[in-house]
Amino acid sequence: MRALPSWCSDIRLSYVRDLACVLLSAPLTDDLPVALRHPLSASVWQQKPETLKAWLLALEQHPEALLAALGSQQTRLGRYFETLWLFALTHAPGIKVLAHNWVMYEGKRSIGEIDFIIEDAQGIHHVELAVKFYLAPKALETNLDLYRGPASHDTLGAKVKRLNDHQLRLTEQAFVKEQLLARGIQKLKPSAWVTGMLFYPDHPPFWHHHHDWNKPGLWVEIPRLHWLSPYQADHPVAFRQKPDEPQMLGKLVCANGRFQEVDRVLLVPDQWPN
């Protein structure tokens, strides 16, 4: 994820700061071989960023609606990310959410789920969302199968293949088209928005094996649900290494009476990726 505008560091509520980062972040990589489209492309928020800024800062002062939308059961980062997007798309000027998490059935068998169908001035769109964190073997690596997740089970190549071969083609199937027509939807434009972070051994942001860790400064472990935006803390506690687990670390410095993240590193077990 790209650095947020400087005014975002003034947002003290983590979930509002996460929302800002979700809406303002660039794609995971510019040359991802997927039909990428920002879900807010046709919204005034994209055309006039100051209107999005005003909405987010007002939300910082009155977060009740966002808190209600998030609920108290957010335990998975992907679901949290999607819920933030649902809240934003529901409130974005010029965008109408026609469906969310719509499960497609062939007979009684589920064959997939559509993240969002939205309508804007540019048409009706089938939108698939993803937030991913991968480690590359080197900078400028072109083989997407070599970008692996912290647990090494999934790869960026596999995610791209699933998007292109299954998720974004779901609405091409005849029985899905019938279900869409039943809702008055005739023509869809499929697209994805994939964001997150890529880490490198030879280029920032870095990843390291645990036994290579030797960076100075105040480093804290960032809980998974706080990976979406630069971390902040009032009373940070230095992290302890967990050699058998991946750990997302943030380097904190004190600014304006609050500790704020200025660097991020992903530590993985020494045997990673095996």
Image (cartoon, grey):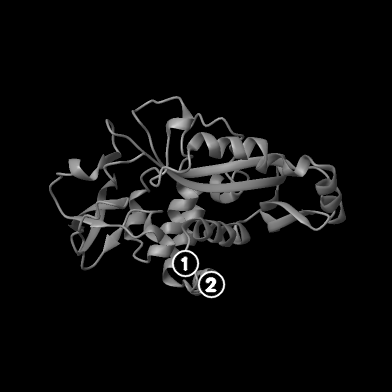
> Residue 9 location, x and y as percent?
32, 56
Q: Nearer the viewer, mark 1 or mark 2?
A: 2
Image quadrant in which you'd find residue 242: bottom left
At horizontal 52% and vertical 43% (from top left) the residue drawn is: 194
The residue carrying pointer 2 sits among few (fewer than 14), some (14 to 19) or many (20 or more) residues within 10 Å by Cα, namely few
Cα–Cα gap, marks 1 and 2: 8 Å
> Residue 200 location, x and y as percent?
32, 35
Q: Is residue 9 left or right of residue 213?
A: right
Cβ atoms under marks 1 and 2 closer than 8 Å:
yes
Q: Is residue 4 left or right of residue 169?
A: left
Q: Label 2 belongs to which residue?
A: 65
Looking at the image, residue 209 lies above or below residue 95: above
Q: Amino acid at mark 1?
A: Leu
Looking at the image, residue 146 lies above or below residue 123: above
Q: Amino acid at mark 2?
A: Ala
Which label number is shown at residue 59? 1
The quarter of the image holding the C terminus is top left
